[in-house]
Amino acid sequence: MPNLLEAKKRTQIKPKTINYELEEKYKTLGKNKTYFIKTYGCQMNEHDTENIKAILEQMSFKETDIMENADLILLNTCAIRENAHNKVFGMIGRIKHLKESKPNIIVGVCGCMVQEEIIADEIKNKYKWLDIVFGTHNINELPKILANNLTNNKLELEVYSIEGDIIENMPVKRDSKYKAWVNIMYGCDKFCTYCIVPYTRGKQRSRTKENIIKEVEELKKQGYKEITLLGQNVNAYGKDLEVDYDMSDLLEETAKTGIERVRFVTSHPWDFTDKMIDVIAKYPNIMPYIHLPLQSGSNKILKLMGRRYTKEKYIDLYNKIKEKIPNCSVTTDIIVGFPGETEEDFNDTLDVVNTCKYDSAFTFIFSPREGTPAAKMKDDTPLEIKEQRLYKLNDLINKYAREANEKLKDKIIPVLLENISEKNEEMLMGYTDTMKLVNVKAPKEKLGQIVNVKIKDVKTWSMDGVIEDKS
Ligand code: 5AD
Ligand code: SF4
């Protein structure tokens, strides 16, 4: 069972690197069976789902996108805010009805939520009808857990508080043929006071550069156009390894593989070095796009959040980025209504938004997460005030997002066409180098290509364009 105090411990034990291999006896366990998996939360979870899908397919399961038809239903959950929980519990309720009419289906819950002690307890006491529950540290054990459930016919709950080894060679069924996630590190050691991630994802463990570069080269060979280096706090890459090699070195080596587009998420302003900015500026295949979570513009609140930078330091970093990479788009995350946030503190946040004029932002109302220090802080701001702050902030964010898009009107920019447009089947959609969504009038044969697009029409969250080159 997970335990938050245990999960908080940072042991000196160095994780080993272990190669995943599916045991022969599990290879036909899913024969003639289908699975359905729903994913909540961040890119890390999306990528975990890609691994889970491939493990299940090695076990002979086949994917279905109709939940009601599936023999195995899995929910890969998120714990970052309360509403993520609510969505999952709502879904579990729906699935319970389904299981009442089809008792043979296997229902599983995995991901960050079950790493929380209170949730695991709740599942154990109130959701005994579930079949399998596993955490973020033992996805590789899914075959064994499934097999045990099939043999014993009772809830198999296997969640570990402490992270284990780094598992290499996990199979992966990628969602896209053109873009791929590449994990560079797991976990986070920052312990921002509001955040549950260091508990649910464990201590920071970096993959070796050799394994990362090998994966990127392999993806390039397979025809992938874009890779995103993935981690909770990518700038801290390598700090846990005994090597003189950091995120700027990794970015540079990744760029040198010649893959067409390199991205990375998420950055913490505290670990963002000048060397990193120089590398991003130097290599045209490192995309001019940086997600740089601000969280708050008030020095008092930043201190309470344990963010390790001030408003001034953040703005300095922002200015350096814009100076060296003038076309760089910068996006952010902001939390309003953190305990103790006054109107003045909130105005400091607006002030930074007015300075940085973000290309876009994710904004949230503070959600207390049990076990984190901020959940125990005195919070006397009424919810209505927090909501008003959120609306005001969103208005400002929208204004700057639109202004940033307006500047691109009639410009020609590269777009990787990755899918059919959701709004119009005749169009394709893709992202610019600066990570802006564009719907493009283009034939389907262009899918998977990076094309030059002339921007014709601009909205707040997307743009419309036409292909400009005659290729
Ligand atoms: N409440 C609200 N927002 C949060 N985030 C993380 N933890 C919380 C919380 N307890 C936000 C941060 C982070 C993003 C992924 O989610 O802004 O950058
Ligand atoms: Fe959470 Fe802070 Fe780590 Fe990001 S850097 S995952 S906000 S603790």
Image (tube, grey):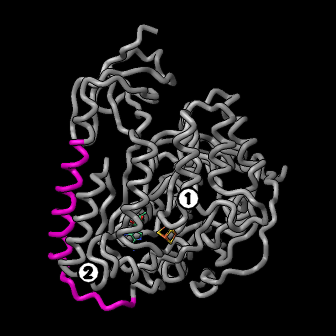
Which portion, as a residue range, is magenta?
Answer: 376-403
Q: Quarter-wise, where is residue 409 in the image?
A: top left
Query: Can you tell which mark lies on residue 273?
Result: 1
Image point 31% across, 47% down: which residue?
359
Is residue 401 found inside the magenta-colored segment of the image? yes
The quarter of the picture showing ligand 1 = bottom left
Q: CA distance from mark 2 to mark 1?
A: 29 Å
Image point 50% across, 67% down: which residue?
270
In the rendering, at what x and y percent does residue 428 appear? 37, 25
Image point 22% across, 65% down: which residue?
350
Query: Can you tell which mark lies on residue 341?
Result: 2
In the rendering, at what x and y percent does residue 312 appear? 36, 68
Circles 2, 1 touching at the beta carbon (< 8 Å): no
Q: State the SS at label 1.
A: loop
Q: Is 14 displayed left or right of 31 in the figure?
A: right
In the rendering, at what x and y percent does residue 274 appear? 54, 55
